[in-house]
Image (cartoon, helix red, strand yellow):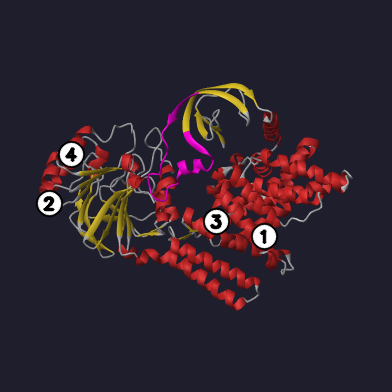
Amino acid sequence: MKQQTDTYQRFIIQPDNQPTNVLITHFNPLDFDLVKGQHLRLDVSFEPPESPQNPGMFDYDRYLLTENVAAQAVAETVHYEGESLFSPIFTYRLKFLYHLQSRLSETTFGLVSALVLGEKSLLDDEFKDLFTRWHLTHLLAISGLHVGLMVHMLSLFLTRICRLNKETTWLVLLLVFLTFPFIAGGTPSVFRASLVGLLGYLALIIRTKLSTLDALSFVFLFLIMIKPYWLFQLGFQYSFLVTFSIVLSRPILSRYKHALTSLIFITALSFLITLPLQLTKFYSVNLVSLVINPPVNLLFSLLIIPLCFGIAVIALFVPMLLPVMDHILMTIFNGLFLLLSTIDRFCYFPFITGRPYLLHLILYAVSLFLLLRFIDQEKYRQASRYGILIVIIISLIKIMPYFEPYGQVTQLSIGQADVLVMELPHRKGVYLYDVGATTGKDYIEVTDEAYTRVIKPFLHYRGIHKIDGVFLSHSHQDHIGSLPFLVEDFSVEGIYIHSSFDEDSKLPYLDYTTLKVGQRYRMQQHNFDIVLPITQSLDPNDNSMVIHTTFGPFSFLLTGDISAEQESVFLAQYPDKDMDVLTVAHHGSQTSTSAALLEQLSPKYAIISVGLNNNFHHPHPDVITRLKAHHIQLFRTDTDGAVIYRFHKNNGTYQWYTNNQG
């Protein structure tokens, strides 16, 4: 892993006499290029691990463990001390990358870097995002397909052009298999393909028989012995699952006479065999990709991958031909990207299932095994029954929330912003109170970080594809900033505001419904009482739409960013309102959560949505003191992570995510 931006560099080191690695972040420019095998001396300060703060959130710390990284640190200084025996190979690889970058267009350079040298980070993010949405990312990383094509092209070159005999060609290919994994980034799929190929050619040289299944099994055992942490790496799991399934399905494939039929079978098999991983990790799948994958795979196999390897060779030996080859590859890929973008615009309908239960996964695995077994035995009627059963199992995963008698209210941990997700039992309705976003240094420019890292993964994790309503308390970005991203990805039935909501903050392409204070709105058999603001204020925070509602045995007061002044108005206007749970206003600002409010309403619980070590120093110590003085159990998203309340009829329980993961 190596990342480099305008502001920092990130790379992995292995300290002397240590079995595990450290991820280093360095914020100053270096006067030398980083390559594998260098000896460095660093002055570092270690950082705490990054545990996920919300359900469904990407577990970065666990991901680092799959790279054998056990710690993270910031390096104040980085000094070059020397290099290992193999460092010149990686130095030449880096120089070759610089050479390609200077001679090729950005698109072609990214493709050649990814498909020949394993530098996927140099690809345009827009390309990677689109290919991810359509389950095509395996084409942008070196795999068995790429290695097989490279070896085939090299073998033809050595025998037809260089006129080498069979034995000499095999020896050259052995050398390629030994060195290519290191040159191409050393991913599990590259090592798998190269080592299986190496064993195959060794068997030819020593004139012994070695089945592909035996070679693959040996490579699997060898890799988990030398790199046991790879067993938990998603790329390793995908690579071996798909390859083992294809090898074991050879009797079926041998019956297909046409290459296109075989390609369709392999695509469907790969999809079905990796579906449990897809749903367990990402909670959704793009079913239309089954139709898109075969032709795109074919295009990469016949044109794009051979062109990339051809350009790499031409760059070394006939550089004057590079402009022509560059133009050809760029034209083909840009055409493909345009076509995929158009399909994505009109045909992208992700099938969101939520996190599957273990029982569902076991039933799916057994059904898939029996399906393939009966296809192998050519008993297609029995096979069709298990195909139908697989569809039923996936459908059950999808509809499970509708059988769930429990409701859930979740205050997400998204930093200095607010998102409260309210789910009614049996999935009768899903509502959000605010959908905030993180902002840039000016506190105005909105980023999609909170949405892509927290909100969207959580909604997918819960199996939510439709949102019945979004209540927007007021027009500050930390309360409404993720709305444009939300409506792009999810079906949102209604957006509810108060009449004091800033008109300039409305998105012109959305319809807003204005709610009246003092009114009770019944939505999906659930009541929401709009209690504030009674009059419009000059302070936008005091124009927050405050909602009183009840979930299970507990009543909630959702307060937005109101000040103590509006709290006094609430107490005077609604002296008989009860409250069990207070969402603390304005992230725990000193101007809110007055002693009078706590004294009169006596809430049992308080929740503060606040960012860790934020620049505003929220929550204010006085607010914490007042809450403690009234013996109110406090939950904070900065220290507790997402705060989750589950309820069923007249029972309800609270938990906080960082202490209750899984």
User: Which numbered disc covers residue 247?
Assistant: 1
Residue neighbourhood size for the residue with mark 3, other residues' Cα within 10 Å, grouped as few (<14), some (14–19), many (≥20): some
Was residue 198 drawn as part of the magenta stretch in this picture?
no
Give the residue at x 51% y 31%: 24
Sequence-first disc among 2 and 3: 3
> Horizontal placement of 406 versus 565: left or right?
right
Q: Secondary structure at mark 4?
A: helix
Which quadrant holds residue 92?
A: top right
Task: Estimate the spatial distance between the alpha carbons at disc 3 and disc 1, rounded to whole Å.
Answer: 32 Å
Which is nearer the N-term, disc 2 or disc 4? 2
Marks 4 and 1, the one that precedes in the sequence? 1
Residue 344's tag is 3
Is 507 above or below relative to 86?
below
Q: Are marks 3 and 1 in contact (CB under 8 Å)?
A: no
**What amino acid type is highlighted by mark number 2?**
Tyr
Give how far across and how far down residue 15 sits, in percent: 54, 29
Q: Is residue 656 above or below residue 253?
A: above
Residues in magenta?
Answer: 43-71
Determine the CA span between mark 4 and mark 1. 64 Å
Would you name the residue on which mark 4 appears? 628
Q: Residue at x 65, y 54 (%)?
A: 217
Secondary structure, mark 2, is loop
Mark 4 crowd level (few <14, some 14–19, many ≥20, 10 Å Cα):
few
For residue 51: magenta? yes
Q: Secondary structure at mark 1?
A: helix
Kind of residue sitting beneath label 1: Val
Q: Depth-wise, is mark 2 or mark 4 nearer the camera?
A: 4
